[in-house]
Image (cartoon, rainbow, N blue to C red):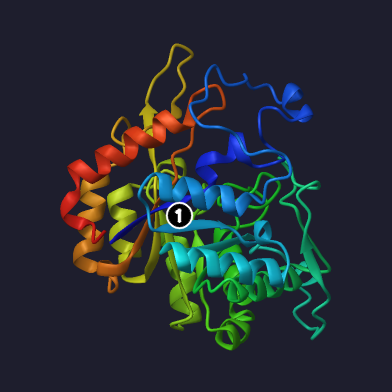
């Protein structure tokens, strides 16, 4: 297994639409950072280069990011070459409404109108991707991924304004059918671009439900990216989830969360933590992947260490990297 970095780790200091020094942050309800031990990127910084530098600073060899951040094809190609020269592999992601209906996906049309990513449009309820359909966004994301030399593109459904397994109006089985139908239409393009697509549980559906989609589509061009902490948010046992997902896993996000079963107001709560301080059985999950994932020896495992904005993300990440290297050393090939 190979250790890497998810760009989401630095969301509060790097993403233009989330960073704490942006004007909109003042109305977000969050506290600004008390201290930051890493220099934030300047507004005109090409963000992928900054993320590559952070990846190398922590001795990591994989970087995963939204391919919209890469820019156009030429910029994606250039960045891909810089990653290759630095010995860093790239994984990509794109946000899509996988449960959307025919109108959103335009399944009966061959139209592939242009789509693009506009960071100025991104925010809590908008991903920044703009296109005539979800399919057009997916196709453009695949083009950018291929230009950068990316081989695995994660399709991320989870977003506040999209359906999820607890939506009352539509049964989970219907959502699974929609995802199966929509994702299947992308397989020919994935083959054209030499890509493996991956579904990524994102606090929206259970791994078991995404496994149903992967099994139904039934192609080597579709797998799963497993976020270790996500099962907790959908009442799924992480060990049960990883055992079911392992044969299909093509990437991992290393993340931890603490479950507080009872608070002063008599409700359960979840808190992000540095890896090792939470309730996720990291070691046991890595062992399952070691035993049951077909590509375990080369599997990319990217740190997704999510803080609240008032905490020092660099301190959390540094602690997490050290713990994972020390406590689970036998799994890492780098």
Please tell me how crowded label 1 is: few (under 14), some (14-19), or many (20+) other residues with Cα within 10 Å: many
**Residue 245 in picture, x, y percent from top left:** 35, 63
Please tell me how many numbered marks the rendered image carries: 1
Extreme-front residue of the structure: 85
**Residue 20 in picture, x, y percent from top left:** 66, 28
Residue at 70% in and 71% down: 74
Q: Which quarter of the picture shows residue 240? A: bottom left
Q: Name the residue under label 1.
A: 206
Residue at 79% in and 86% down: 110
Residue at 19% in and 65% down: 291
Identify which residue, 308 or 98, lies in the foreground.
308
317 up-or-down from 300: above or below: above
238 up-or-down from 296: above or below: above
Q: Is residue 159 left or right of residue 86?
A: right
Secondary structure under badge 1?
loop
Q: In this view, does 153 lie to the left or right of 16?
A: left
**Residue 171 in picture, x, y percent from top left:** 59, 58
**Residue 195 in picture, x, y percent from top left:** 53, 78
| Residue 77 visible to an observer of this rendering | yes
69 up-or-down from 193: above or below: above
267 up-or-down from 165: above or below: above
Q: Is residue 147 left or right of residue 27?
A: left
Residue at 82% in and 82% down: 111
Query: What quarter of the picture does the C terminus occupy?
Result: bottom left
């Amino acid at each position: 297994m190979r250790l890497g970095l998810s760009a989401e780790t630095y969301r509060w200091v790097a993403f233009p639409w989330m960073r704490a020094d942006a004007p909109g942050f003042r109305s977000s309800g969050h506290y600004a950072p008390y201290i930051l031990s890493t220099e934030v990127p300047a507004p005109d910084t090409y963000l992928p280069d900054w993320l590559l530098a952070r990846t190398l600073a922590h001795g990591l060899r994989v970087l995963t990011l939204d391919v919209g951040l890469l820019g156009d094809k030429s910029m994606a190609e250039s960045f891909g070459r810089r990653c290759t020269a630095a010995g860093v592999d790239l994984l990509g992601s794109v946000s899509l409404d996988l449960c959307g209906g025919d109108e959103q996906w335009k399944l009966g049309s061959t139209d592939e109108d242009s789509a693009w990513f506009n960071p100025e449009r991104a925010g809590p309820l908008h991903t920044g991707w703009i296109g005539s359909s979800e399919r057009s966004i997916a196709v453009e994301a695949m083009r950018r991924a291929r230009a950068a030399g990316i081989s695995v593109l994660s399709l991320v459904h989870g977003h506040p304004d999209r359906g999820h397994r607890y939506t009352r109006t539509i049964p989970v089985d219907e959502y699974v059918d929609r995802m199966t139908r929509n994702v299947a239409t992308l397989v020919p393009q994935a083959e054209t671009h030499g890509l493996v697509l991956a579904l990524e549980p994102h606090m929206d559906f259970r791994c078991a439900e995404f496994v149903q989609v992967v099994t139904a589509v039934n192609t080597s061009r579709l797998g799963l990216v497993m976020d270790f902490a996500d099962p907790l948010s959908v009442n799924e046992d992480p060990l049960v989830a990883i055992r079911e997902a392992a044969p299909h896993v093509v990437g991992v996000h290393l993340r931890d969360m603490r479950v507080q079963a009872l608070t002063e107001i008599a409700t359960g709560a979840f808190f992000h933590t540095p890896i090792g301080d939470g309730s996720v059985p990291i070691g046991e999950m890595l062992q399952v992947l070691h035993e049951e994932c077909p590509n375990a020896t080369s599997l990319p495992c990217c740190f997704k260490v999510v803080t609240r904005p008032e905490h020092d993300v660099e301190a959390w990440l540094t602690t997490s990297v050290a713990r994972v290297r020390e406590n689970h050393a036998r799994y890492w090939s780098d």
